[in-house]
Image (cartoon, rainbow, N blue to C red):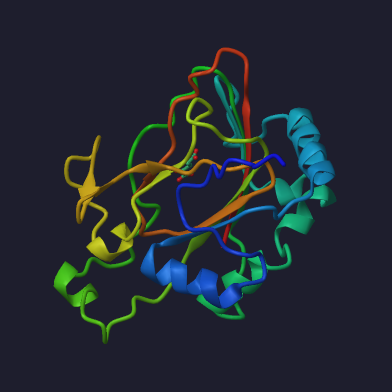
Amino acid sequence: MTTVANIYRQKTFDLHDTAGQVKALHEDGFALIPGVVPANIVEEAREHIDRLTPIGFDRQSVTDHYKCVFNRDSFWLQFIDWPGIIDTSEAAMGSECHIIGQSAWRSHPGHNGWGPHTDRIFFELPEDILADPRVKLPIYLCTAHFYLNDIDEELCPTYVIPGSHLSGTGNIPNRNDPEFHGRKLEPVLCKAGDVLIFRCEVWHSGSLNRTTDRTRYLLQVHY
Ligand SMILES: O=C(O)CCC(=O)C(=O)O
């Protein structure tokens, strides 16, 4: 009998465990969901990214970045309301939540996405208020990362600090190597077809593609 090593460093959730994922968004700031996109669609998505050409604010270099790809090809529409992911989005943000972007990335060898940040802090709050169990910070904005490669530490994983959305601030102290309640940024290692959904206040970062011969393919849906 062979055993498969567990590569996951964070808690993982079943695709249809909407309540568990929403609880994780409130407690950790993110939820990692294995096995969302089947291998054939992962492959097709990579091929579609390879065919994109830059327009407007898109850029191509060591990092290729294409915005709002739902405008380019109906292929991308399926990711907007992917079963399970859209259920969590709507349960977290309300049934009227809608998408505000869909970005496709190719991060080539040498891509350096390091830069711990929040995506948006709508208003700052003292940490002790957010620690009060009577206070539940509403979820206003989330991003889902659809990973289109197996992600190891060499292939520019996304980094997160669990619970850091409860800092109440986007002014991250010691920004290059931050810590929140004793926790540092940790890489999200995962498989092609996995999804990480995270709320905008969580401290997170891209990182360096240390490989010489692999490109990370990523699709983001911003709700
Ligand atoms: O490249 C990544 O994994 C992270 C991207 C990111 O931090 C962002 O788009 O805000």
Q: Residue furthest front?
A: 1
Eyeballing the image, is 184 above or below 110?
below
Query: Which residue is nearer to you in this view: 151 or 60?
Result: 151
Please identify the quarter of the rendering in which residue 98 is found. Answer: bottom right
In this rendering, does residue 126 appear at all?
no
Quarter containing the C terminus:
bottom right
Quarter containing the N terminus:
top right
Give the left or right position of residue 103, taking residue 173 as reference: right
Eyeballing the image, is 76 above or below 59?
below
The location of residue 144, given as percent across then percent down, is: 57, 55
The location of residue 185, given as percent across then percent down, is: 33, 43
Q: Residue furthest top?
A: 212
Name the residue at 63% across, 65% down.
14
Name the residue at 47% across, 41% down.
158
Query: Which residue is nearer to you in this view: 107 or 134?
Result: 134
Q: Residue furthest bottom?
A: 134
Please identify the quarter of the rendering in which residue 65 is found. Answer: top right
Name the residue at 17% across, 46% down.
173
Name the residue at 20% across, 56% down.
181
In this rendering, does residue 165 appear at all?
yes
The location of residue 177, given as percent across then percent down, is: 24, 37
Q: How many marks?
A: 0
Please identify the quarter of the rendering in which residue 90 is found. Answer: bottom right
The location of residue 179, given as percent across then percent down, is: 22, 47
Query: Which residue is nearer to you in this view: 8 or 19?
Result: 8
Eyeballing the image, is 1 above or below 133?
above
Give the left or right position of residue 163, taking residue 97 as reference: left
Query: Which residue is nearer to you in this view: 79 or 211?
Result: 211
